[in-house]
Image (cartoon, rainbow, N blue to C red):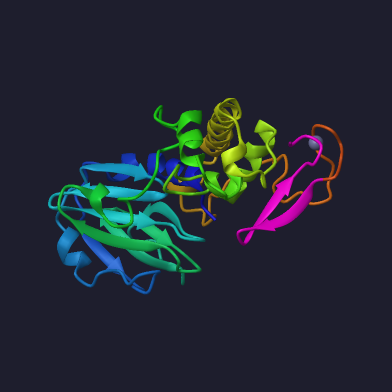
Amino acid sequence: MPELPEVEITCRGIAPAITKRKVTGVVVRNPRLRWPIPRRLPALIAGKTIRSVQRRAKYLLLEAAGGWLILHLGMSGSLRIVKSDEPAGVHDHIDLQFGSHALRLRDPRRFGAVLWHAGTNVLSHPLLAHLGVEPLETAFSGNVLYAAARNRRSSVKQLLMDHTVVVGVGNIYANESLFRAGIRPATQAGRVSAARYDRLATEVRATLEAALKAGGSSLRDFVHSDGSSGYFQQQYFVYGRTGEPCRVCGGPIRVSRMGQRSTFHCPTCQR
Ligand SMILES: [Zn+2]
């Protein structure tokens, strides 16, 4: 699944090819994504210039006159810049054409979304209005987590994955950040000290930035038509490593279920 680093790298990858470029056509091959692609979309955006490409949480926001195109990659989506006449595959559901090249969405599982928001304030859209702080921006700190944790009975891991508190910390990065901060995922959020939340915020940022760095080298996958998804391959401390030796102490990594998600931790290194 594309996580925040993949979406950020996608944003950086596609922006140069479509910013200040006019949409010359829209090809919708299959409108049945998580929500149907609006039937009027081609009429709404064709002929307009993309003014900017931005990211909010895992949404990509393409600004045009009179509105915004909101894109989400869902479980399996990827965006690439292709030649307009490159034959589409069975999972290539929509192209935004820019003359000789096109922005193409491939999404085998079709949990992605392509929506139109009329008006200038895209952040008021119902999908975006209640989102928390961006983890890579300076507003994110241990204080944000500590304040949100007051009187909360849920676990620290669930707090970290609560998008109304901080966005873009998916299951992989929650597991990894908690390991790096030495905090056991099941710990009740309200019982973690301010100092430990400072450390956790630092590790969330470091984990995401390491992924961005790893992804920078695979940027080509997003802008060239090699057909690969472009999701990053990384070395994890705990994620997906059930029973394998901890990279710090050598003890076995344990797995449990928490809020429907697999949770990995080292009982020795995390307290
Ligand atoms: Zn360990």
Q: Is residue 120 left or right of residue 165?
A: left
Image quadrant holding the N terminus, namely bottom right
The percent position of residue 254, horizontal first and vertical second, equals 79, 49
Highlighted magenta segment, given as a residue range: 253-271
The percent position of residue 246, horizontal first and vertical second, equals 81, 39
The percent position of residue 47, horizontal first and vertical second, equals 14, 56
Q: Is residue 134 left or right of residue 151?
A: left
**Along the viewing direction, whichever of 143 and 217 lies nearer the viewer:** 143
Depicted 96 relative to depicted 175: above or below: below
Image quadrant holding the C terminus, namely top right
Residue 219 at least partly seen: no
**Along the viewing direction, whichever of 115 and 159 lies nearer the viewer:** 159
**Along the viewing direction, whichever of 143 and 116 lies nearer the viewer:** 143
**Along the viewing direction, whichever of 73 and 251 lies nearer the viewer:** 251
Q: Would you identify the image quadrant in which residue 26 lies?
A: bottom left
Ligand 1, by image quadrant, is: top right
Q: Is residue 149 left or right of residue 19?
A: right
Depicted 71 relative to depicted 51: above or below: below
Depicted 42 relative to depicted 268: above or below: below
* Marker count (numbered): 0
- Residue 265 is a magenta residue: yes
Which residue is at the far front?
Answer: 151
Residue 175 at least partly seen: yes
Q: Is residue 16 left or right of residue 220?
A: left
Depicted 29 relative to depicted 192: above or below: below
Residue at the image point whose x is 21% and y is 41% from the top: 20
The percent position of residue 110, horizontal first and vertical second, equals 45, 68
Residue at the image point whose x is 59% and y is 50% from the top: 171
Residue at the image point whose x is 62% and y is 44% from the top: 188
- Residue 269 is a magenta residue: yes
